[in-house]
Image (cartoon, rainbow, N blue to C red):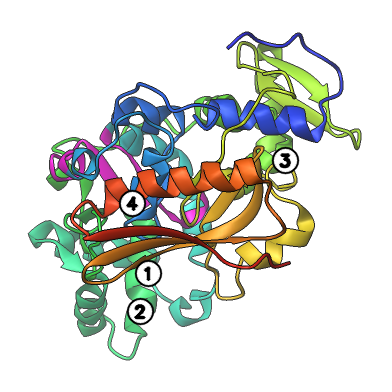
């Protein structure tokens, strides 16, 4: 797709089309899964199925088994990374991203569980956790109980949660694979990947990759996506390698030099995004993808980020996958009335999704609820 000439001010549609292009959402791509994951800087993976659907909506010919084989083959891993949340990334990216994010994760130890860890020797706790996981993979529940034997009277969940942030833990399959909902067994990268973490801790390259995948973006956007502090200092260091714009409110937007900027009027196909999709979570100002008045329908009070419908590049509704013994249904809940052509396109997209995720169901159906919000 040809690049649009640079402009000093980028409107919401320009930012929307730039992100959709970089997030592989303007057209499905012919790409390997590892290459796609690295271009996207991983996919959020709070639940096992969303990354599968996230790849299906972005890649030509995606099949569930392709990703499962990569996870089982230790080419792709699930672990705590950006913002202290679970992500699915290539093994190579895990080894280089985790050291950069270690300060973020250690800072989070002092969050909800901080009071329960007061007075503990954190380094001794980390060493004990590593030793227990070196012996064999263990679930968080198992790990917490064993740590309580060394620190009696402490909260088991708090101890296990601290290890998840202090040590780079990988979820052992079948955790993270399609429809697997059992507690994850945790292990260390040197045992699972036969390689240690990389030693470089500078965030510069990670910030450049963020801008290539999600930019143009503000300093605050970078911080929201990564959880890093001191982002402005990083940006100032990188500034000779960046180009700058402004948004419609006069805020500075930063970008890598050769990233695409499609015309704001570039057509955007309908898309079904999974729960927790990166495009909803990677900016402080999310109006480039979802209007403020629709956020409450997507971001629930209990921390769920619902699966969403894109029409003309923006969130225009939510959807759910309903599977029974012999049938599967995609139920679409639009926020308002849909044009006939968009309704037809979404029905076709829903049918394609069902063919991928429920190939053995006797019946497939795509249903539309009455417009809400």
Cα distance in 3D space between marks 4 and 1: 36 Å
The one of 14 and 101 positioned closer to us in this rendering: 14
Q: In the drawing, does residue 12 fall left or right of residue 94?
A: right
Quarter containing the N terminus: top right
Nearer-N-terminus badge (4/2): 2
Secondary structure at numbered mark 1: helix
To which quarter of the image does residue 72 belong?
Answer: top left
Nearer-N-terminus badge (1/3): 1
Secondary structure at numbered mark 3: loop
Q: Is residue 132 visible?
A: yes
Cα distance in 3D space between marks 1 and 2: 6 Å
Residue at left 66%, top 10%? 3
Q: Which residue is mark 4?
A: 354
To which quarter of the image does residue 12 belong?
Answer: top right
Cα distance in 3D space between marks 1 and 3: 34 Å
Question: Which label sits in the foreground, 1 or 3?
Answer: 3
Decide: few, some or many residues near mark 1? Use Cα within 10 Å; few <14, some 14-19, many ≥20: some
The stretch in magenta equals 69-91
Q: Which residue is mark 1?
A: 161
The one of 325 and 154 positioned closer to us in this rendering: 325
Q: Which residue is mark 2?
A: 157
Secondary structure at numbered mark 2: helix
Residue at left 22%, top 80%? 150
Q: Which residue is mark 3?
A: 288
In the depicted structure, whether residue 18 falls above or below residue 310:
above
């Amino acid at each position: 797709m040809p690049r649009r000439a640079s402009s000093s001010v980028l409107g919401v549609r320009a930012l929307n089309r730039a992100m959709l292009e970089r997030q592989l959402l303007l057209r499905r791509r012919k790409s390997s899964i590892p290459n796609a994951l690295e271009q996207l800087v991983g996919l959020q993976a709070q639940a096992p199925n969303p990354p599968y659907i996230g790849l299906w909506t972005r890649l030509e010919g995606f099949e569930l088994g392709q990703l499962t084989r990569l996870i089982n083959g230790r080419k792709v891993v699930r672990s705590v990374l950006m913002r202290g949340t679970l992500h699915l990334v290539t093994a190579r990216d895990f080894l280089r991203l985790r050291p950069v994010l270690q300060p973020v994760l250690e800072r989070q130890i002092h969050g909800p569980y901080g009071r329960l860890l007061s007075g503990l020797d954190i380094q001794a706790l980390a060493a004990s956790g590593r030793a227990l996981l070196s012996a064999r993979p263990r679930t968080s529940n198992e790990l917490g109980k064993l740590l309580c034997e060394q620190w009696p009277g402490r909260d088991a969940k708090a101890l296990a949660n601290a290890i998840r942030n202090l040590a780079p833990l990988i979820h052992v399959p079948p955790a993270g694979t399609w429809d697997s909902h059992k507690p994850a067994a945790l292990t260390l990268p040197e045992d699972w990947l036969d390689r240690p973490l990389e030693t470089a801790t500078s965030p510069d390259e990670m910030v450049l990759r963020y801008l290539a995948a999600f930019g143009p973006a503000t300093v605050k956007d970078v911080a929201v996506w990564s959880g890093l502090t001191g982002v402005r200092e990083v940006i100032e260091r990188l500034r000779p390698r960046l180009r700058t714009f402004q948004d419609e409110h006069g805020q500075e937007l930063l970008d890598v030099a050769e990233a695409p900027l499609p015309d704001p009027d570039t057509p955007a196909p309908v898309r079904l995004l999974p729960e927790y999709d990166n495009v909803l979570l990677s900016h402080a100002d999310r109006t480039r993808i979802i209007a403020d008045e629709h956020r409450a329908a997507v971001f629930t009070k209990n921390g769920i980020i619902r699966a969403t419908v894109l029409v003309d590049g923006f969130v225009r509704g939510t959807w759910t996958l309903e599977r029974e013994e012999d049938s599967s249904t995609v139920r679409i809940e639009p926020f308002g009335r849909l044009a006939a052509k968009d309704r037809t396109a979404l029905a076709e997209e829903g049918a394609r999704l069902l063919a991928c995720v429920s190939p053995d169901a006797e019946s497939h159906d795509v249903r539309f609820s009455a417009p809400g919000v």
